Amino acid sequence: MLFIKALEFYTENIEKAKKDIKELDKKISLIGWIRLLIVIGMVYFGYKFFKSNNVTLLVISEVIIICILASVVLYHTKLMNKKRKHNIFIDINKRGIDRVNGEFKNVVDNGSDFIDDTHAFSSDLDIFGKNSLFALINDTTTKGGRDRLSKELTLDSFKDIESLKEKSKGIKELSEKASWRQNLRVNGIYNFKNTKKEINEIEALKDFSKSEVKRNKLSKLIAYLMIAFNALSIIASITSIIPLTYLILVLIIDYGVVTALTKKKKEELVIFKDLKNTIKIYADAVSLIEEEEFKSSYINKIKDKLKTNSNISAKAEMKSLASLSEWVGDSTSNAFYLVLNILFFLDVFIIENLEAWKEKNGKHLEDWLSVVSEIDALSSISNLHFDNETWVFPEIVKEKVVVAKEVGHPLIGNRAVRNDYSLDNGKMVTLITGSNMSGKSTFLRTIGLNLVLSYIGAPVFAREFKCGRFNVSTCMRTKDNLEESISSFYAEILRIKLLIEKTEKGEDVFFLLDEIFKGTNSEDRHTGAKELIAQLMKGDARGIVSTHDFELCDLEKEDKKIENYNFREYYEDNKIKFDYKLRKGRSTTQNAIHLMKLAGIKF
């Protein structure tokens, strides 16, 4: 699959799906005419046999025609559902083309609800929100997968180097299964339905699986007895042993009994109505995962959670739960079901079957859900490898280094200017100077984002990328918090305090500091930055500091562990321009006065 370029793959899929839809439309149109003819036939034969007073033929013909019509309607529904899946498939491939072309700024789900200004780096590095890493990567279908992806991107689970290597192999294998991943997503979107109620589906399912099993054999026995009683009453009524009106009393009694038997569990049934689409999504996903063969030890380790000591089939059991949840959905929204429930006590048997399912599988359900969620998240991440042929998997080493060749900003894509950078051979801190808008902040995010991608097992936007295993910490976008009465400068101090605490705990930190202490005077800013850098180096941290304080560049002469890099501007026709190329050494240019002149300030 990797030999087919992503754009060609997505385009071919769209064209094929459009052709299939045209064929389906022809069949759907034909079925529409057939349905009309069947209805006309029903009316014709009904009128003909009614007029000839032939009741037997009237009943037989109408029953046959109704059966034919029902079959045609079912086939028509099947075709419509197939067409809907094809349209979903087209949308998925259009989304793929958008990703390849870097058009993801306006995606509906950009993970803005995960934004946390107190996190060590997520706000500064645009992990969530508009034009974010989440917006680029997210292709999840399940809520569990979406939550899992957010935790991946915030590096909640710290993995050792060997685990990361195995994870990368797993992500690479998933990227090669593009058609399988799209099938997983089509089924998920097809079954997805927004519920009006605010309900955490995953937590609700976990609560159900962990709740006490309460099977009631007496309720089941009463239900069987009442069904037998109903059958006898109907027979007696038909044979005129009892009046037909007596059945009304029987139905009233039935309603009272079924209500009494299911009263304590009715709330659970209502919840399951809201969960039925979620359960169907997870059931289909479990089937696809269980049936697929994987070579990666990392993926197989996840898949193994579907196995149990008692050889229970997760696929079969999840399908069973999905089937039960369908019945539950009908129980609260279908008038025909109400009649069947009164006559055959369906709610009693559904509740009993749910309890039996929970007794058998409750202890496994959380693992089964986590398998789907994790594969869902990893499948989204694997799009990066499939969509970007020039991206490479990083080399993660034990040494505290960051070395990159032709590294670019992952969210800028092909428009990004790519640079070489190294922090090795005993170097600990990079000082980046340069004029306004020359690319300093963007470069800090370039390194930060590629480190995050490295630590989730994803490929990075570089020709080569080698890094140690660091805790990423940033101080770039501090802002006022009026509710907490915190100024931007004090917010910056709090971020620095957390950074220092990490180094004091012995954590391997890689810091990204952009124009630190900009909220105070130049003398204090210089002194504070100089002392902070010294303290971070003492804590064995590594990192990059961007600054307009050219005097800080003198630190390179004082300590060989510090190295200067710079960005610069140039002018054409009295217009300021930038090449965004990173160069070694301190900056020798500045453009603030020129920008002020452009604003109309006269000097």
Image: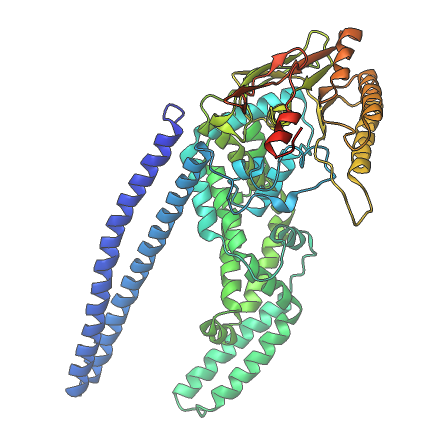
406 or 283: nearer the viewer: 406
Q: Position of residue 1 (x, y in %)?
A: 39, 27
Check the image and report above or below for 97 versus 52: above
Q: Position of residue 477 (x, y in %)?
A: 70, 35
The image quadrant where one finds the C terminus is top right
Check the image and report above or below for 261 versus 161: below
The reply, left or right, for residue 121 in relation to residue 333 is right
Is residue 294 visible in the rendered image? The answer is no
Tell me the quarter of the picture where residue 518 sits: top right
**What scheme was used to colour the molecule?**
rainbow
370 or 339: nearer the viewer: 370
At x 55%, y 68%, the residue is 347
At x 71%, y 40%, the residue is 117
Is residue 133 visible in the rendered image? The answer is yes
Q: Position of residue 40 (x, y in %)?
A: 19, 73
At x 57%, y 27%, the residue is 298
Check the image and report above or below for 221 versus 136: below
Q: Position of residue 135 (x, y in %)?
A: 54, 39
